[in-house]
Amino acid sequence: MKKKRLARLAVALTSALSAGALLAACSANGGPSASAASGGTAVKGGTITYAAEQEPPCLYGGWLQEAYIDRNILDSLVTEADNGSIEPWLATSWKESSDHLTYTFTLKPGVKFTDGTALNATAIVDNFNYWEKGGNSTAQVSDPYFKKAVALDATHVEVELNQPYQQLLTMLSQGYFGILSPKSLTRSTQAQCDDPIGSGAFEVKKWVHGQELILLRNPGYTSWPATAQHKGPALVNEVDWKFLSDPTERYAALTTGEANIMYDVPTQDWKNAESSYQLTQYITPGKPVSLYMNTAQGPFTDTQVRQAFAYGANRQAAVETAFRGVIPYEGNPSVSKATPDYDASIASAYAYNPAKAGQLLNQAGYTGRDKAGYRTKNGKELDVKLAYPAGSVVTDEGATLLQILQQQWKQIGFNVTLVPETQAETFSGAFSTPSSYDAQPWYWTSPSPAILWIVWRPSTKSDPNGSNSSFYNNTQLGNIINAANTATSTTTAAKDYDQAQQIIQNEAAAVGLYDQTMSIAAAKNLHDVWLEKSQGEPVFEDAYLTK
Amino acid sequence: MTAVSEATVPVASRPPSARHGVRTARRIVVKIVTSVVVLLAAASVTFFSQFLVPGSRAATILNEQTGRTEQYTPAQLAPVNHEFGFDKPLLVQYLNYIGGLFRGNLGTSFTQHRPVTQIIGAELLPTLILTVAALAAAWVIALAMILLTARRGRFVSALGSTWEALTASLPTYWVGAVLLVVFAVEIRIFPVIGGTSVLGTVLPVLTLAIPLAGFLGQVTRDEFEKVLAEPFITTARTRGMGDTAVRLVHALRHAVLPAITLSGWALGALISGAVIAENLFGRPGVGQVLVTAVNTRDIPTVSGVVLVVAAVYIIANLLVDLTYTLIDPRLRET
């Protein structure tokens, strides 16, 4: 055994360049010690060590990584079940007025925040006001039709809208809309960052910056959602939320049993993780990772050139190669396959067809070829500057995908330059103007097709839309999405959302690449950690360990 | 940096004169003043460099908070500009910043909303432990290799210098990943998630120490072999001194000087390079703080870390100068 191990190690050391491959090679037949036989006896209490990835600068805010944590500390009004239905949480029931402009929520009585304050209608109204004032960056875009929230009595809240908005409840199910204690809201930003106070199954015990966040069980927990797998406070005492940015380390920690569960399994370890652990992949609803095409300036102002770009590379095969078959291809550029009202039929448009791409380029006037083989129009080369946010959005594997595509686009005459953006450049807005790129991949998570309004709402002088990164101002498209958002019947809404997806695809205002995914792998002795539907937040209140 | 004097000066020490005392005091004052100037220069460079990167600071802060990447209208930016004092004239901002430094105030992080001193303070000790231990370990490994292999016959010598050339050129991340897989996953001696525990510090220290040891060894080996061929070594041997004693007492003393010079540089480089070991072994530290702050353009934190690293460089070089005088008695007289 020892000899075999050494031989294996020698092979790994000499052949493997990447550390990840090394780890995969070593753990492939070593077998994890942590995986106890399932169905063992349940341990009372205990600590779950979660090998998470990114440490947010602040525990409360509009980032997904913050929502992951907040879901375990804060309760929301409603939650989304796996089948997409909206289920009770802090609100036990709700009524929609006949004009669809008012929602009246009935709150679960007797709920207390962990600081002792009562969770009543006034507290809910305080939260709505805080979000709208900018305390929750996601509120204004998630609910563009919000008018006001009013406390009717201790357990009844009324939310008034300017227009009907059937997506309201789905949007409110995101972790960003967790309810904070009114006392928590009035504290300094720093206090709010370090210790958001809610009524959830856990509360913040200690945050060791750069290392870990310790969540402590709330013994007085009474407000579990309808989707919970058990009724009562959390089963474990603590969750040790470790911030381990290196994927090799996270997987190694799971292998040795130092962590019970890990975030985002590296694709090279996928096969091994499938057999050794409980592996769950979550496909994020909302806008998938697709290329925004600059329709305001440069070669992509011409629809035919955009379509040629879509036809000109075998995106599906490239995605499978770059991500080792782990992350699915997404041909629908506007919503991912996990989004309600997704149209699968339009995802198959623009299947790889270099001949068709060539034809379209000819029609667009790019008939010449220069010495390097790139197409030209009136002597001008067909240049595309493809900028991508490296690291945070487009991983190393994502960058590999773009390189594969770059080679294929070269065959049909596009000279694609790949420009990696640093995170600092990205957030400075350096790549947000029509003159800074021709194409740029991005995703936007959202549990609802209302994401279409956020991304594609036409920009006007008085109300610019900075999220419309294709600079695609199509009034007809805007009207259709708005009609869908404000429709009073779900069937009409679905039809309109579908039409919007078709317009975006037909016009090639964006080009599909792959779905935004996340995954967790849990040791076999950890049970009932589940991913919430709207954003894939890991939920620990039902989880327990077995011996 | 003090240069090694080639001139032969009598080795016997003389009693220090009054004039010598004044000279020493003056030298110390000059050193302190230049150190402060260097620190201020570092602070100023980082302060002004934030204006060289594209986009406004307020837009970055807004984008960080919302997870977006947009540009904003002046009206949208105004409240943020006001909150962080970006609406004040540049000179006022600069003077406020420098003034704050003298009061020990490094500002407040744009993203964490905590004082920078608090952010760095909590992470400085683990990094100092890591880097100082790595430097010490690198010296132990380098010296052991040299004492054991230099001028021990062609094969052994070649083995030593090959080891040094190899380790000096290994990428730190690779060294760390191999150590992690071998000693934490396969043979489970050390933890994967090291944290700040003693056992958990071993692998991060070795990750940084092994490539550095190769580098220090390469520098020292040449000098060491040259010294062993010197006539005074032969003299020592003829006095009946044993080989080990000759190597330790006579040859090493001469040979380590260049490597000591490099140690000052190495300590600074280790601090800024610590992030690789910190990330791989889940260890808190200034390296991680710096990388995150640079990524999020958290200027006050970046400046704070730059100042700390600059201070470490300065202190390390002062120590190097001091060590020099201890090892090379000729310098005490100059």
Image: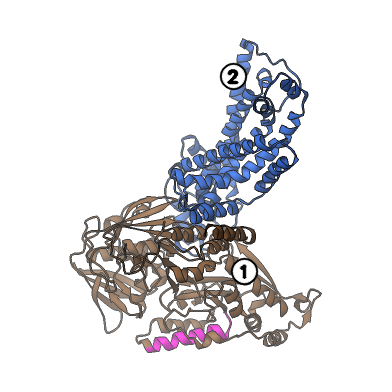
Chain colours: A brown, B blue
**Magenta region, main secondary structure:** helix
Residue drawn at the location 46% of the way across and 71% of the way down: A274
Q: Chain of mark 2?
A: B
Viewed as shown, does residue B104 lie left or right of B236? left
Evaluate whether label 2 is on the same chain as label 1: no
Viewed as shown, does residue A212 lie left or right of A198? right
Judge whether residue A505 is colored magenta. yes
Q: Position of residue A110 (x, y in %)?
A: 18, 65
For badge 2, the amino acid type reads Ala
For badge 1, the amino acid type reads Thr
Q: Which residues are magenta?
A: A491-509
> Marks 2 and 1, Cα distance to the nearest angstrom?
60 Å
Between label 2 and label 1, give the one nearer the viewer.
1
- Looking at the image, residue A185 lies above or below residue A481: above
Residue drawn at the location 74% of the way across and 29% of the way down: B227
Q: Which element carries disc 1, helix, strand or loop?
A: helix
Name the residue tied to disc 1: A400
Q: Bin the neighbour count of mark 2 within 10 Å (Cα to Cα): few under 14, some 14-19, many 20 and up.
A: few
Viewed as shown, does residue A171 lie left or right of A102? right
Q: Residue B25 bears which disc, if any?
A: 2
Q: Residue A525 bears which disc, if any?
A: none
Residue B298 visible in the displayed image? no
Q: Chain of mark 1?
A: A
